[in-house]
Image (tube, rainbow, N blue to C red):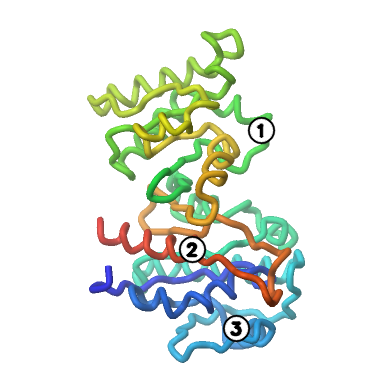
Amino acid sequence: MENKKIKIAVSIGDLNGVGVEIALKSHGKISKFCTPVYCINKKMLKKASNLLSLEIPNDFNIHEVKGEFDIKPGKVSKKSGKFSYDSFTEAIELAKNKEVEAIVTLPINKESWNKAKIKYKGHTEVLRDFFGRNAIMMLGCKKLFVALFTEHVPLKKVAKAINEKDLTKFLLDFYKSVNSDKIGVLALNPHASDNGVLGNEEVEIFKAIKNANKKLQKDIFKGPLVPDTAFSPASRKNLKYFVAMYHDQGLAPLKALYFDQSINVSLNLPIIRTSVDHGTAFDIAYKQNRELNCKSYINAVKEAIILQDKR
């Protein structure tokens, strides 16, 4: 890793949150194994560094993003939402044009995006639309990774979204991305429905698993797994990769186990994109005399390099 410095575009995230502080404090460390290019502009960087009482490193290379506004620590803001979106789209363009080898994103605020009239709910949706590909959201760390079949959708819509055709394609795309020989697929209902007593969605999940394994001519996908025991220590000894049917089903156990070190990875795309697996932390943004954990960001940068090396 140290011998091959790749260029990474860093989408700066919501400037009212902790992202820019993480970037400034981690710069010295990540610069040892990559060349970061920060999507921000000089005026906004200076405003943030002054508020944080942090020096801007001499080699803090930036890619100019248009826009200037007053930073309001910890506040939902249309202007900061728009700027974070523009920072991300600039990073995408850099990757698309092969000016960088990967993108790493710092946290955005979904409410701020909504206030800015941005139609997307998050980074993955933007990537999916931009590239016209079924981008897969996977989160985790080297000990455990969870892919989400449905993402930011209301819970009441999850059951209707589960169908044999779409889930089969998802499983095959996921396998191509991670190339693991064992992947656990979670059921939707408690007790995996107890053979139809608690629901019939497991029929669709079972068919998709069978289809995918048949297509691959390997017994890759296991399940449907009973959700409340899927992440037990015994299960995790045998499985590192899981597919969850909905957001909290997969992310609640992941964050309980590995909150500080897990990351977000977008799979099945022509570009590499990784991200921190935490939010803007508005409650501690720009506050002094407290520790700020940068491990998720550093891990995201390292994973981007690993993924680039595999290409």
Question: Which residue lies at the image location 57% right of the left edge and 83% below the top edge?
Answer: 41
**Nearer to me, 218 or 30:** 30
Query: 219 above or below 64?
Result: above
Q: Which residue is mark 2?
A: 295
Query: Could you say where residue 236 lies in the image, as x and y percent from the top left?
Result: 40, 35
Question: Which residue lies at the image location 30% right of the left edge and 29% below the top edge?
Answer: 220
Q: Amino acid at mark 2?
A: Lys
**Nearer to me, 220 or 11:** 220
For residue 155, which numbered disc appears in the image? 1
Does the rendering let one see residue 213? yes
Point out the tag, 2 or 3, that comes first from the N-terminus.
3
Q: Please, what secondary structure does the residue beneath circle 3 have?
A: helix
Q: Please, what secondary structure does the residue beneath circle 2 have?
A: helix
Q: Quadrant of the N terminus?
A: bottom left
Among all residues in the image, which is located at the extreme bottom?
58
Q: Which residue is mark 3?
A: 45
Point out the tag, 1 or 2, that comes first from the N-terminus.
1
Q: CA distance from mark 1 to mark 3?
A: 39 Å
